[in-house]
Amino acid sequence: MVAADDGTWSLDFPTLYVVPDWISRHCRLQSVGGLDDTPMPFEMYDWQLRITANLYRVKPTAQLGQLATAFHYRRAQAVAPQKSGKGPWAASIVAAEAVGPVLFNGWARGGERWRCSDHRCGCGWIYEYEPGEPMGRPWNKPLIQITATSEDQTDNTYRPLQEMIRNGPLAEVMRVGEQFIRLPNDGRIDVVTSSAQSRLGNPITFASQDETGIWTEGNGMTKVATTQRRGLAGMSGRSLEQTNAWDPTENSVAQKTAETKAKDVYRFHRLPPKDLDYAKKPERRRIHAVVYQGSHHVDLDSIEGEAAELMEKEPAEAERFYGNRITAGMGTWMVQDRWDARAAHEDVPDGTRIVLGFDGSDVDDWTGLRAETLDGFQFTPTYGDGLPCVWDPEDWDGQVPRLEVDAAVDELMSRYDVARMYCDPPYWTSEVAAWQARYGEKRVSEWQTYRVVQMHAACEQLLTDVTKKDSRFRHDGCETTSLHVRNARKAARPAKRYVLRKAAAHLKIDLAVISVVCHEAATDAIAAGLAKPKKKSTVIVL
């Protein structure tokens, strides 16, 4: 994922340079709101060119005849804020996939040319390749789908595509209709939604998937994405997602793409600085300046007006749409960016005085340990050969390995100077009792997370120490803990208190709960004076 940057990037890899040049020559749009309505060539913004270059990045080992496998990335995802220009840019990519030089056609020796006259286009454009440059060719029979949750949504891409065709030389080779576009050799571009079941199973060469941040199981779009990818695989085709940031509680297609471990998926998501608060107008303006960087048509005053109005009723939605942040809906306990901003790289030597937090499950939720030094650094400790003290039952034949957990606790107790260990005992009462007997009840204590007063206070303490600017709290940047923090929601209790709950059944929060318990142990240990260095005994020499 590409975080916030200064807009500079290095093009130090082979790509089909001919594609953005072809788009600039053939795709024309009228300016919006300008005095001159003459169609102008579509020139990509820097961020659009960056994604395009990566989408058409060619492997150095690519060979003539390869289709999708000639490219470094099988598919790409662009996450950008509302009105930043995703739709017209995606339309230009679709136009290129329809009749442009988008397939690898070997390596140029120098002097080779792309001539539009060789491909039914009478515009007269010629592109000359440099020596060693990858060359392009069109699909023989392109089959493309522009996909969204509704026909109105598909218009984000389909309408500028229609305009690009009608305003320039593409009208000679593409016939525009209301629901589809005819291409040479019986190729076509179709507009598809979840209701068009008859078309979803078709083999396709390219798919433009719009607003995948709202593609979920509930509206049937997760199945659409899966079906389209099967169709693409059969034709060795590729796809492009373009979307706003998503609500992480909905487990959308965009979220799955962003979190995939696959190496052949390119993801672009320009994030603002994590320490800026979207609720504060001056900081919101700075956020907009970062995420809309390069989209020169955008008036930030207009964006601020829309965002401020939406903030009154749907602050999380405003932050997703205009702040480009992955933000959950109402009831969020802690903003993930605030938690992530506390990440630091620190080594904790053996023998360091620490506290431990533990929460255990059996066959469903995760079991884990978090540790915290008494100067405020929290981390996931390791045991054995560097294994993290986190146990997902699915990784252990459906049940947490209790002997592994016991061995990990024993190792941590001997490796560090553990001042306190707070344990949430359900499902682990026997083990906690055994640890108390083995290490002492002053070191190992039960700490029940179901107690509303105590849990509310502990959650508020950690929340405060994460968010206040002069706090010394920091953590190791554990990705699992970050995801669990993001998934945690406030479950209301009497007297304006709360405990933590899951945003959805499949979204785990166990490491977030353990972080709360661990931080509470650290706070209590400091209050008890355990952060003070041990007094050295005085030796009197007679």
Image: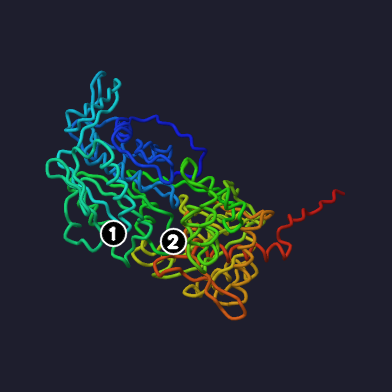
| For residue 478, side relative to residue 541 (left or right) | left
Q: Which mark is residue 151?
A: 1
Q: Which residue is mark 2?
A: 247
Q: Which residue occupies 60% across, 49% down?
A: 348
Residue 28 in picture, x, y percent from top left: 32, 38
Q: Which mark is residue 314?
A: none
Q: Which residue occupies 64% across, 62% down?
A: 464
Residue 457 in picture, x, y percent from top left: 63, 71
Crowding at dot 2, Cα within 10 Å, few <14 / some 14-19 / many 20+, comes out as many
Residue 342 visible in the snapshot:
no
| For residue 26, side relative to residue 320 (left or right) | left
In this view, 122 is above or below 448 = above
Q: Earlier in the sequence, mark 1 or mark 2?
A: 1
| For residue 25, side relative to residue 387 (left or right) | left
Residue 369 in picture, x, y percent from top left: 52, 61
Q: Which residue occupies 36% across, 30% down?
A: 13
Count of numbered labels shown in the rendering: 2
Q: Disc 2 on helix, strand or loop?
A: loop
Q: Which of the two residues, 126 or 74, is positioned nearer the viewer here?
A: 126
Crowding at dot 1, Cα within 10 Å, few <14 / some 14-19 / many 20+, comes out as some
| 3D distance between C-alphas at marks 1 and 2 | 22 Å
Q: Which of the two residues, 508 or 412, is positioned nearer the viewer here?
A: 508
Q: Which of the two residues, 299 or 113, is positioned nearer the viewer here?
A: 299
Residue 541 visible in the snapshot:
yes
